[in-house]
């Protein structure tokens, strides 16, 4: 249907038309003692450690929506490129989309130039993107990777601040995890020792923070490749259901069955030679 | 970084226009097309990012061009802007989708993906404008 009050094609990108409506709705809802739905956050513990052969990243797997656990097996370690992975804390949708965009941009770059992207490039792209939106995109990310210049671990805050450090923790459980990391980190650790350290850091975050919980995922990035261990350790506190609550096949009885064969006949056939020179 | 130079570039950036009343013919509020006017809605942008996003591309271009002028001389931004203007004219009529291929290639948008490519794609917009109205608006006849 053609509308006559539209005089220009709408601009692409973010659309702010509903902001004043949302503000008005918020006011109405508060008056009626109900709350607007909260976005799904990954109140999280994520941690990263640089070791001798590469980078070890770890994360818990709980996603919360207000006071309810929304996802018990959430994947917080996102793929960026074959040599880089990124853990995300903050609003779940924001971290997903931002890391997806970053991954697409780096794939285009590596197809164009024929090289594996460097970690600094990913960090700069993230920083530009997050600063442009002045922190409205709530994504705190830990980016770790191995490239030709060495093993790197960076953190990017929601307003675009970056930091290059050998060990790191972010999210709501970061204070607990940082305690463990500060105590036992040594430069140039062995791989197994680093994995154990990250596991212990995430575990202390899970124990001491309400927003983190369930399983621990670990991702090990080395020059030879990536080992994404999911889950590295499952939580001991799993539900023990009394029975199976799924329906058996055959629960719904079939009353009638009618099969109509679809007969197709070839009307026209054309062959086009492809020039594979 | 030369912050003094940056300040002089920023004062040329696109001024904050805000959401002015939609003027129709005769310079008066065009109630038929854009509805009743409300001073509160029009003075202040309701979202922190609304103004910044509206002018983002223009401001970036201004900064880049003045940097280029300072480094390479006047001819560099002049030639680039000439090419931009030429590429911007290669378009279909306003109510049809044009691919902006030449303009995207010049600006380097063909090698990057950002929120402009994912969200609110005009090719998939649910509302279609009336062709005659859109062409008249484009030509400045109304």
Image (tube, grey):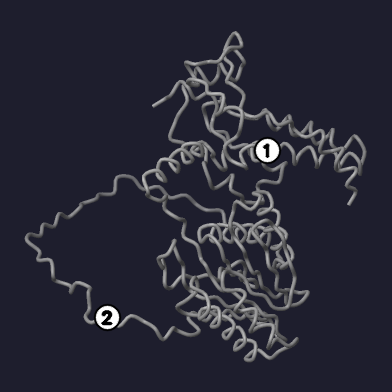
Of residues A157 and A174, the one drawn nearer to the viewer in this rendering: A174
Residue A98, image x, y percentages? 59, 58
Residue B6, image x, y percentages? 86, 43
Alpha carbons under labels 1 and 2: distance apart: 61 Å
**Quarter placement of the N terminus of chain A:** top left
Q: Regarding mark 2 in the picture, which secondary structure is present there?
A: loop
Q: Is residue A80 left or right of residue A18?
A: right
Residue under pointer 2: A241
Q: Mark 1–mark 2 contact, CB under 8 Å?
A: no
Q: Is residue B72 left or right of residue A73?
A: right
Q: Regarding mark 1 in the picture, which secondary structure is present there?
A: helix
Q: Is residue A163 left or right of residue A73?
A: right
Which chain's residue wears label 2?
A
**Quarter placement of the C terminus of chain A:** bottom right
Up/down of A229 relative to B115, above or below: below
Label 1 Cα neighbours within 10 Å, binned few <14 / some 14-19 / many ≥20: some
Residue A178, image x, y percentages? 65, 78
Which residue is pictured at 47% across the width and 25% down the height?
B129
Which chain's residue wears label 1?
B
Of residues A242 and B76, the one drawn nearer to the viewer in this rendering: A242
Up/down of B25 relative to A207, above or below: above
Label 2 Cα neighbours within 10 Å, binned few <14 / some 14-19 / many ≥20: few
Q: Which mark is residue B102?
A: 1
Give the number of marks.
2
């Amino acid at each position: 249907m053609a509308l006559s009050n539209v005089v220009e094609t709408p601009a692409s990108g973010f659309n702010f038309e509903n902001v004043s409506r949302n503000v008005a709705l918020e006011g109405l809802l508060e008056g009626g003692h109900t709350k607007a739905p909260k976005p799904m956050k990954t109140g999280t513990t994520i941690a990263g450690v640089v070791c001798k052969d590469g980078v070890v990243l770890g994360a818990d797997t709980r996603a919360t929506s207000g006071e309810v656990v929304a996802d018990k097996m959430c994947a917080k370690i996102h793929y960026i490129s074959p040599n880089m992975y990124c853990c995300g804390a903050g609003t779940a949708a924001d971290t997903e989309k931002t890391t997806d965009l970053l991954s697409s941009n780096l794939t285009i770059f590596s197809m164009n130039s024929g090289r594996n992207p460097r970690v600094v490039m990913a960090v700069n792209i993230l920083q530009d993107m997050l600063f442009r939106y002045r922190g409205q995109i709530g994504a705190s990310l830990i980016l770790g990777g191995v490239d030709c210049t060495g093993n790197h671990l960076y953190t990017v805050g929601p307003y675009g601040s970056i930091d290059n450090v050998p060990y790191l923790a972010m999210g709501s459980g970061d204070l607990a995890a940082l305690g463990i990391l500060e105590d036992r980190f040594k430069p140039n650790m062995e791989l197994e020792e680093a994995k154990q350290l990250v596991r212990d850091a995430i575990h202390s975050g899970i124990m001491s923070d309400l927003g983190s919980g369930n399983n621990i995922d670990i991702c090990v990035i080395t020059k030879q490749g990536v080992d994404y261990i999911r889950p590295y350790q499952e939580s001991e506190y799993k539900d023990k259901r009394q029975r199976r609550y799924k329906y058996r096949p055959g629960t719904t009885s079939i009353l009638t069955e009618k099969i109509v064969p679809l007969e197709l006949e070839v009307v026209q056939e054309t062959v086009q030679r492809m020039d594979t020179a | 970084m030369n912050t003094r130079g940056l300040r002089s570039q920023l004062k040329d950036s696109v001024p904050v226009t805000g959401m002015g009343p939609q003027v129709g013919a005769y310079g008066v509020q065009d109630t038929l097309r854009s509805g009743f006017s409300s001073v509160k809605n029009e003075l202040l942008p309701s979202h922190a990012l609304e103004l910044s996003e509206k002018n983002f591309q223009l401001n970036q271009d201004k900064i880049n061009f003045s940097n280029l002028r300072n480094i390479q001389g006047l001819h560099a931004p002049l030639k680039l802007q000439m090419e931009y203007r030429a590429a911007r004219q290669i378009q279909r009529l306003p109510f049809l989708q044009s691919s902006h291929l030449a303009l995207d290639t010049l600006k380097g948008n063909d090698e990057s993906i950002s929120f402009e490519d994912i969200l609110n794609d005009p090719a998939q917009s649910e509302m279609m404008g009336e062709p005659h109205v859109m062409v008249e608006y484009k030509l400045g006849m109304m």
